[in-house]
Structures are given as structure tokens and as C-alpha cells.
Image (tube, rainbow, N blue to C red):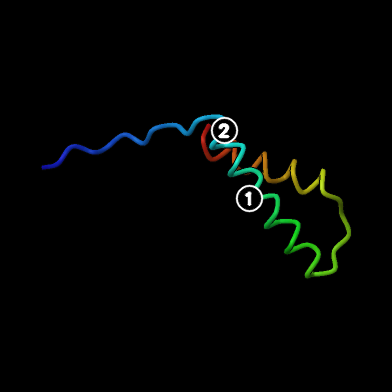
Amino acid sequence: MAKEEKKRKPTEDEIKKEIHDKADKIYRERIAAGRPGDELADWLKAEIEVRRKYN
């Protein structure tokens, strides 16, 4: 039976890149749907989702 590989925690730079990509996706989806909001709210939502994933 093979040993399970432990997932390494991403570096802070990798997390920031993932947050950036997620915020961009949230922004584009929001604009396409015509929903109100702003870039800061998109960023904060992305940051919460990404950081939860690794904690």
C-alpha cells in the first residue's frame, strides 16, 4: 500500500497569486451578471475563500 503524500502548504506568494486570480474571476463574473460591487469587495471575498481553503 502506497503512503499518502502530505499536501504541502503553499507559500504566501502562491496564496497571493491564487487570491489575485480568484478576485479577477469574481470581478469578471460580477460585471458579466451586472451585479453592483467594487474591486475591494471582490478581493476580500477571494481572500476569505482562498485562506479558508488552506486553514
Residue furthest right in the image:
36
Q: In this view, does 30 lie above or below 13?
A: below
Distance CA(mark 1)–CA(mark 2): 12 Å
Q: Which mark is residue 49?
A: none
Q: Quadrant of residue 50?
A: top right
| Quadrant where the image shows the N terminus | top left
Disc 1 and disc 2 in contact, CB within 8 angstroms: no
Secondary structure at badge 2 equals helix
Q: With 23 as the anchor, is 31 left or right in this view?
A: right
**Could you say where residue 30 lies in the image, as x and y percent from the top left?**
78, 62
Q: Earlier in the sequence, mark 1 or mark 2?
A: 2
Q: Quadrant of residue 15?
A: top right
Residue at x 57% of width, y 33% of height: 13
How many neighbours does mark 2 have within 10 angstroms: few (below 14), some (14-19), or many (20 or more)?
few
| Three-letter amino acid code of the residue under disc 2 | Asp
Residue furthest left in the image:
1
Q: In which quarter of the image is residue 51?
A: top right
Q: With 9 as the anchor, is 52 left or right in this view?
A: right
Residue furthest bottom in the image:
33
Secondary structure at badge 1 equals helix
**Could you say where residue 25 lies in the image, as x and y percent from the top left?**
67, 57
Residue at x 82% of width, y 43% of height: 40
Residue at x 63% of width, y 50% of height: 21
How many neighbours does mark 1 have within 10 angstroms: few (below 14), some (14-19), or many (20 or more)?
some
Q: Mark 1 points at which residue?
A: 21
**Could you say where residue 49 lies in the image, as x and y percent from the top left?**
63, 43
Q: In this view, does 31 lie above or below 45?
A: below
Residue at x 74% of width, y 44% of height: 43
| Three-letter amino acid code of the residue under disc 1 | Asp
Q: Which mark is residue 13?
A: 2
